[in-house]
Amino acid sequence: MATNAWQDRLTPLLSCGLLRDIDCHLVTSLARLLNITPNADSNVAIALAFASRAIDDGHICLDLNIDLSDIVTPPPECNITLPDSRALLAALASEAGQILAGSAVSDKPFVLDNNRLYLRRMYNYESYVAGQLLKMATTNAAPIAPHLDVRISELLTDTDQQQAARMALTRRLTIISGGPGTGKTYTAARILYLLGETTPTENPLRIRLAAPTGKAAMRLDESIREAFSQIAAATVDHTGIEPASTIERLLGYNRDSPYYKHDAANPLNADVVLIDEASMIDLPKMAKILSALPDKCRLILLGDRYQLASVQPGSVLAELCDSKNLSSCVVTLQRSRRFLEGGAIAQVSRAINKATSLADATAIWQKLATPPQQNTPAPDITLHLTPPDLAADHCFATSIRQAFAAFLQENTPAAAFAALNRFRLLCALRRGPYGAENVNKVIENILTTPLTAGGPRLTKRGEWYSHRVVMITKNDYNYKLFNGDIGIVLPDPENNNQNAVFFEETNSTGAFRRLTGHLLPPHDTAFAMTIHKSQGSEFDRIMVLLPTSDASVLSKELLYTAITRTKTTVDLWATAEVFQTATIRNTKRFTGLRHQLDATPTTP
């Protein structure tokens, strides 16, 4: 059998970190199971193993229209030459290749479609998502009534917001993209209200709200209900909106099972499903969402297509926004009310999105590095050079003490969370001297010394010291804690002031729940968090920390997401070279979703 020969070819790639154990094991196990002959082309093994590895890197497939050496770079010390795409495609056309990889309609474990190599599971997800969305896009819910056109003009003033409302009232699928402050949830709330006006009082519309994280769900719920309260005096509320939840809760997570409670056989009890922060939805999760929608249910997706793609495989929202066949279901909101039009945040975030050359990136850096003129307002982005040693840098330490001083003074959950949400430090990396793991240790040490003599400071006594900030990193359905949830350790007056970890409830009641530290699922200290983890959150003021050397994860999407997490000001710590390199680096996800969406012309 080919198992030993293929293993010999894969082992150096494994040793260099280009492949994982699971990639190699999958390929050699399939070779053994399907009796691949000993003289089979070992390039088959390389193609299949990298298709498996691609998923861990956020891709849906291995794109063999591109040479492998342009996708992965072996470390110089490994002395490995990767086969080009022609050699890999030729190997897949061999007898062994055709046993393991076939067309979309075959029963092979891998699919080769338009020179894209997929694991069968990922291809099925992609095909299903494309098919369901096209079906929804070409199914009009109902023509818009003349009186509703008048109501749209009364409730929404911006042309693009009105366009989104007309779209949502006449179609099953609506995708609303826009940057921070463009009014996505403002528009969505009025869409829901208008839908409610078309529904008889005795049969209220069943609306479900969801977001990828608990924090984002809480913000969505607050925004929608606040918007409803603003227009409640004008008309009667015919809608039945349940509290917003995470997508996991919406679908009904089953412990110890990859399947959800709600699927095609047991769809959601909903007429409208509205999901915020859709850029964070990966391809498998989107397939699960679509599977759980009942017939005739409307789906409204809100998000910012320029934000970071999902942590898991795919870049679904961006692909949907780029699809020609979905263009009649997509509207982009342009006018931001959060940032000053002439301010640095608005200008720099737009410039980062548009930058394509080093000259563009240099111009942005020079703008940030130019001191403000006298008698002009302070800039909303302040630039600092990242120091070679954070722990020893006086300026960094002073900034941290000033930023957390108000938080350390508060001892009630409501006041502490309010103070914490006014500032957060966002790290580009998780590991390394400038990664969130190490930066949290640096911050802990800095905060043990007060800003001023006699001022508040951290007193670290044991693991669960007062004012420690934690972030949950793994879902726990017993305690209803989810990845990304933030907790604060504070004295519990109901338990003799023993320290407990407090969490905000996600039902907009302003309530808090408490747990003892030893009951928490896996978690990290979170005075600082990664930019990835900050998606779905916003803060009054942020500090963004970039490392002093380049890393492949540093991209324009990462910078844009970081800078737009604030309501008012950004302290940006960076070096010119790292910032400029990141500004012109696009995050690339290999996927065939847009191809599948646009392969067949449709008639809206």
Image: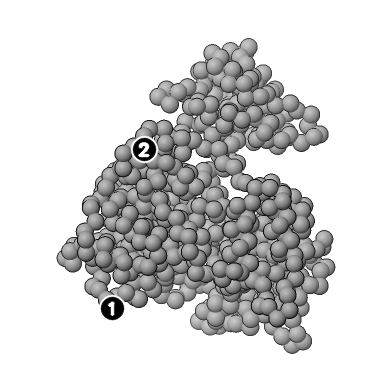
In the image: residue 504, left or right of residue 431: left
Q: What is the secondary structure assignment of the residue under circle 2?
A: helix
* Between marks 1 and 2 in the image, the one whose residue lies nearer the viewer: 1
Point out residue 179 in the picture as x, y percentages from the top left corner.
Answer: 51, 60
Q: Residue at x 72, y 51 (%)?
A: 359
Q: Quadrant of residue 149?
A: bottom left
- Please report whichever mark, 1 or 2, sits nearer to the chain's N-terminal start: 2
- Quadrant of the frame with the N terminus: top right
Q: Provide the residue designation for mark 2.
A: 131
Q: What is the secondary structure assignment of the residue under circle 1?
A: loop
Q: Residue at x 72, y 85 (%)?
A: 455
- Residue 116, compared with residue 452, is above or below; it is above
Point out residue 44 in the picture as x, y percentages from the top left corner.
Answer: 60, 21
Q: Provide the residue designation for mark 1.
A: 233
| Label placed on residue 358 | none
In the image: residue 145, left or right of residue 119: left
In the image: residue 502, left or right of residue 397: left
Q: Amino acid at mark 2?
A: Gly
- Residue 229, compared with residue 95, is above or below; it is below
Q: Amino acid at mark 1?
A: Ala
Q: Quadrant of residue 133?
A: top left
- Quadrant of the frame with the C terminus: top left
List the single residue furthest toward the bottom: 454
Tag 2: Cα neighbours inside 10 Å, few (<14), some, or many (≥20)?
Answer: some
Q: Residue at x 72, y 73 (%)?
A: 372
Point out residue 602 in the picture as x, y percentages from the top left corner.
Answer: 34, 37
Tag 1: Cα neighbours inside 10 Å, few (<14), some, or many (≥20)?
Answer: few
Asked whether residue 464 is in view, the answer is: no
Question: As rendered, which of 383 and 507 lies closer to the eye?
Answer: 383
